[in-house]
Image: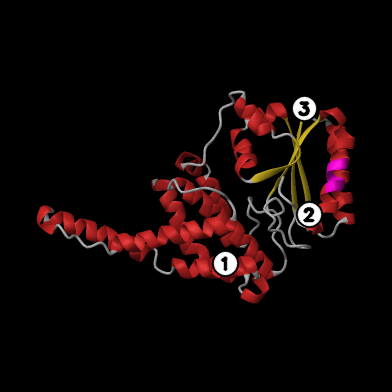
Amino acid sequence: MNIMQKEFVPLLKEATAECRRIFKDNFRTAYLHGSIALNDAVPYISDLDYYLVVSKDIDGRDSNRLAELEAGLQSRYPVVNGVHINVHSTEELRRDMFSRFILRYNSVVYSGGDIVREMENEGCDRLFPNADTAKMRLDFARQCFSEALGGGQPSNTGEIPSDTFYAARKYARYFAVIEGAYFLMSQGRFSTFEKENVISELRQFLLEIRQYSCVEFVQADEISDCAIRTQSLCGVALRNATTGFEDILDITERVLYDPVKAGVGKDDYLKTVRPLVEWMFEKIQNA
């Protein structure tokens, strides 16, 4: 397990102890998802996404106790802006390949064994970080981005902070970093959802596009004029389509690391990042 940010450790310990008390031997594994899992949370702004796996389906009494637990934890630990405990049985998880994909690649085990790897080692079908997985969720991603552009609550982000600068940061995490990671999957370049890696890989991809668009055909006598013109036009089109994307990544990094200092509000950030996000969606669709 990764070392957690110290501000959230008491909350995580109590949440786990209480879940173990409620479910006893039914408790299997607790995963952390989101910014706390990535050590990228902002105290008093970020929320807790806690994914609990239990041996058998829960009943209405369990659901009520969990709701009370969430409310109690939120009251006692205002260091988070929300507490979300999602509970699934092992059988539900066995059938849900996408949840297992998220737990494997964008979550960390906090307590218990890594049941996702256990299931896969037993032969459960799984998703891989590739173009097929990126395409599978593309309609949902487009819907969420459309919701954000329309001023609504996106289905994928959880509650948006009321502070416009931290709202911009949350949009940067979801629409530049997470969608950027799925774009990298579609290009066979994914390695992690961590923001540093995703931004770096996106920059490298854009650099390679610029280099491709500037290729000189030193063996022109062996290539038809038509082929030369076609390849040259493709390179120019790629370069033109991505003009300004490096600047968008620069702004995104500033928003991610110090949103208040960056001074970019949520509406301005969405307008800024829109060309990059829509381009990534198109590339995923055509991968």
Residue that appears at 56% across and 32% down: 126
One can see residue 175 in this view: no
Quick one: quadrant of the C terminus? top left
Q: Could you tell me how far apart the alpha carbons at marks 3 and 2 are, in whole angstroms?
A: 26 Å
Q: Secondary structure at mark 1?
A: helix
Quick one: quadrant of the N terminus? top right
Marks 2 and 1: which is nearer the front?
Answer: 1
Please state the horizontal and vertical placement of residue 8, each as a whole percent of the image.
Answer: 80, 55
Q: Secondary structure at mark 2?
A: loop
Q: Is residue 218 above or below residue 112?
A: below
Q: Where does label 3 land, which residue?
A: 55
Residue that appears at 67% across and 74% down: 260
Q: Is residue 116 magenta?
A: no
Task: Describe the colour scheme in one phrase.
Answer: secondary structure
Residue that appears at 50% across and 68% down: 248
Q: Residues within 10 Å of mark 2 (few under 14, many from 20)?
A: many
Q: Where does label 2 land, which residue?
A: 82
Q: Earlier in the sequence, mark 3 or mark 1?
A: 3
Marks 3 and 2: which is nearer the front?
Answer: 3
Q: Where does label 1 land, which residue?
A: 253
Q: Is residue 126 left or right of residue 153?
A: left
| Secondary structure mostly seen in the magenta stretch | helix
Within the image, what quadrant is residue 64 found in?
top right
Please state the horizontal and vertical placement of residue 176, each as a whole percent of the image.
Answer: 54, 59
Q: Is residue 16 magenta?
A: yes
What residue range appears in magenta?
13-17
Q: Earlier in the sequence, mark 2 or mark 1?
A: 2
Q: Amino acid at mark 1?
A: Glu
